[in-house]
Amino acid sequence: MWAARATFPFEFAILLGDNIYGRQDLVAKFQKPYQPLLDAGVRFFAALGNHDDPDHRFYPAFNMNGQRYYTFVRQTVRFVVLDTNQLDPKQVAWTEDTLRTSQEAWKIVYFHHPLYSDGGRHGSDVELRVVLEPLLVRHGVSVVFASHDHIYERVKPQNGIAYFVEGSSGQLRKGNLRRSDLTAAGFDQDQTFMLVEIAGSEMHFKTISRTGVTVDSGVIGRRSTT
Amino acid sequence: MTTHPLPHRTLPASGQYSAGALFHFTIEHFLLLPLGGLIALAWANTRPESYFTTAYALSFVVNEIGMALFFALITQEIVEEIMPGGALHTWRHWTLPVVGAGGGIVGSAFVYLAYVAWKHEPVLTAGWPVAGAVDLAFAYFIVKAMFRRHAAIPFLLLLAIAADAFGMVAIASRHPFVEIRPGGTALMVAALGLAFALRRWKVRTFWPYLAVCGPLSWGALYLDGLHPAFALVPIVPFLPHAPRSLALFEDTPHGPHDSPRHFEHVWKYPIQGVLFLFGLVNAGVLLSGYGTGTWALLSAAVIGKPLGILAAVGVAVALGLHLPARLHWRDLVVVALATSGGFTFGLFFATAAFPLGPILAELKMGAVATGIGVPLAIGAARLLHVGRFGRHAHHYHEAHRHHGSRDHPPHHAHRVHHAHAEQ
């Protein structure tokens, strides 16, 4: 990531949950490895996964402001971050309200558990999908990022929304991708991270492996928000 | 064309007779709930999108409103067992089972939390009450089937009631997942005040308690962020009651509309329908949705809870309390294992402790899987020669196998003699 930043100076990063495994040592497992990026002013906006201590929402470097779910804006993009460990009625109502009142051109939502996934261990969370997908479609969300399955997968657009499973940035489950008709692209042989840039009505993305190889890239068009 | 006169009396078709008997058996043994659960499991794993859409649409009505009737029935049963004249009135009946229940909760919580900590999934921590849940009906029917008339039955009932009561208190609050709004306390005061007044005015029909006090209490709990399914629990004690004698869930003589039994006679079948829907709406989990919560719950329920019960009772006995007459340690092992099945209460506690999501799905799967407690309890009874598997029961069975008739099959005669032996 540090090497990629030399040519692509990204401003912030999003974390898709299960940010810390095992002993919840934020200094050893987050602060120290990412110190160069933190020192360069890169901010991290985290979502909570099932392996995360819920109190991580109070960790300043995760920029969650003590909330399990929250929203922030970067230029023309409204990001909505959810806690899919526990999708309570209050959170669902907040999500609908936030998306409905958002004026930004782009709406991007991210959370831990994928609504669509071909990961062999977990797969699609259909129970979450029946609740969340109608909201996302109704309110013009363009892109959804999730993880939970330790693979990379770009899912074919579903009801106009582009879905990504990026769960191999930390821990990898090699060979766990079960390609199907849903799969547009996938990679499960090494850890990966994504670089994303939004320019006007296009989102350019590049998925890079631990060794610097580009395993996927492309352009996603913005959905109409009307 | 030749015609034949109809016989004066026609026998019912054998299919009709079987269907009626099957329906009656299903109702009497609370089998609609597991039937709903089995349908849910099959549906969720074959057509998940349609299942979860339907379940999500029905969950509020079933879990937050329909289940209020079920808890009202349970409360009525309990109130009438423990009131003066009831079989469970004296404190001497209560002490050891309550101690056992406490031990079971501590044991299950310890194993659950230890497992969750070992797997580094602190988000599951709040699920510990689910592991302590006991499916009252299932445990009762298992123990009754194995022991018939025996001190193990009231012991189990008291233990299960105490364990579930504690669990209900632990999961009653749903904050911070729901809004808390003002006015709840005032509504509850109104509900209880009206129920008290109705009792003072000797209003014996249950309808005003149910139709007026019930919704007030429901609204109070809902506004206060507490589980509204418990709405009738504080109201039912004001209903007219008559003492019971260990007749949990059994039919009692039908009375007039103002009799203490009228409530359960009117609602018995609708509540079974609610339980069917409860199983249908809540037990549908994807078989691939297992996780840490599933294993934590299962190990806590099947290992931690029984061991906790036995340890607590052992300490209490060592400190001077006594096991009930004719309840031996081998019987207690079977009773402890019979409590490992959480099913109904486990599912309910899970849905109360966690909102929709993968965490809830893991725990629901664990709650369903605790049904393994049934064969474990039966297996333990066989191994330890307890109840109907006791050595003296075997001798009676062998003796009567040679003397049984079509109208009085050997096992019925065996039951009668075994019952006398237990007394």
Image: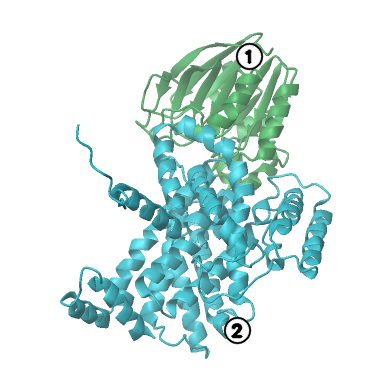
Chain colours: A green, B cyan
Residue B162 position (above or below residue B366): below
* Location of mark 1 (residue): A198
Nearer the observer, B189 or A192: B189
Q: Residue at x 29, y 73 (%)?
A: B412
Farthest bottom residue? B320
**Residue B411's x, y, as percent?**
26, 72
Judging from the image, mark 2 belongs to the subunit labelled B
Q: Residue at x 18, y 80 (%)?
A: B399
Q: Is residue A6 visible?
A: no
Q: Quadrant of residue B310?
A: bottom left
**Residue B396's x, y, as percent?**
23, 81
Judging from the image, mark 1 belongs to the subunit labelled A
Nearer the observer, B269 or A129: B269
Instruction: Kindly identify the amino acid type of the residue bearing the numbered disc 2.
Output: Thr
Which quarter of the rendered picture does the C terminus of chain A lie within?
Answer: top right
Q: Quadrant of residue A31?
A: top right
Secondary structure beneath disc 1?
strand
In this rendering, position of residue A211 left or right of residue B130: left
CA gap between label 2 and label 1 equals 74 Å
* Location of mark 2 (residue): B90
Instruction: Kindly identify the amino acid type of the residue bearing the numbered disc 1.
Output: Ile
